[in-house]
Image: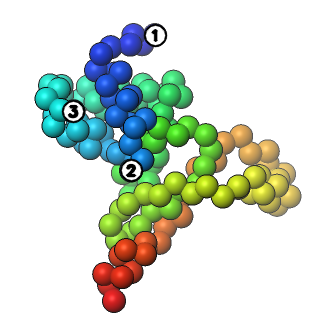
Amino acid sequence: MHYNSKQREIIKEIVLASYDHPTAEDVYMMMTQQGIHTSISTVYRNLHQLAESGVIQELVLPGGKVHFDGRTHDHPHAMCVECNKIYDLTYADEKINDIVYDSIGMKVLKKQIIIQGVCLNCQKHNN
């Protein structure tokens, strides 16, 4: 059983208000900039507990880097391999469930789709 601490509430609010999928280090830095004193281990622990309880979503990206998302519904993400920015994709991906079922007979319960590429901004800078 986890109690709702003031720090956990602040951490939750930071992730829910953020659309750039922060890491634990990002959340820690935001708290520090707001003058909130805590330890990085407290941030990690609370983020993990919030993800475990379904309040936020944990995104384990290629390379093992963990980011957090306040939008907990199943939705795909795109990650730029140049700048590491993560984008929420809003297309309907229900057809993927049918493809998986038709291919191997598996009923999809949960999915995490991460598409890797180079974002438009990085493409412009590389030309």
Q: Secondary structure at mark 2?
A: loop
* CA neighbours of label 2 inside 10 A, class few (<14), some (14 to 19), many (20+): some
- The alpha-carbon separation of the residues under discs 2 and 3 comes to 16 Å
Q: Is residue 10 left or right of residue 90?
A: left
Location of residue 23 by image quarter: top left
Question: Closer to the N terminus: mark 3 or mark 1?
Answer: 1
Q: Residue type at mark 2?
A: Asp
Q: Looking at the image, which is closer to me, 33 or 60? A: 33
Q: Amino acid at mark 1?
A: Met
In the displayed structure, does residue 30 sit left or right of residue 22? left
Point 82% across, 55% down: residue:
98
Position of residue 6 relative to residue 27, above or below, is above
Q: Position of residue 108 (x, y in %)?
A: 74, 45
N-terminal label among 2 and 3: 2
- Residue that label 1 marks: 1
Q: From the viewer's perspective, is the residue at label 1 or at label 2 nearer?
A: 2
Q: Residue at x 43, y 72 (%)?
A: 119
Which residue carries the number 3 mark? 31
Label 2 sits on residue: 20
Rendering coords of residue 126 (x, y %)? 32, 84
Q: Residue at x 74, y 57 (%)?
A: 96
Q: Amino acid at mark 3?
A: Met
Identify the secondary structure beneath mark 1.
loop
Which sits earlier in the primary sequence, circle 1 or circle 2?
1
| Above or below: residue 16 compared with residue 80 | above
Q: Residue furthest bottom?
A: 127
Q: CA distance from mark 1 to mark 2?
A: 29 Å
Decide if residue 11 is in sight here: yes
Residue 13 appears at what percent x and percent y? 37, 29
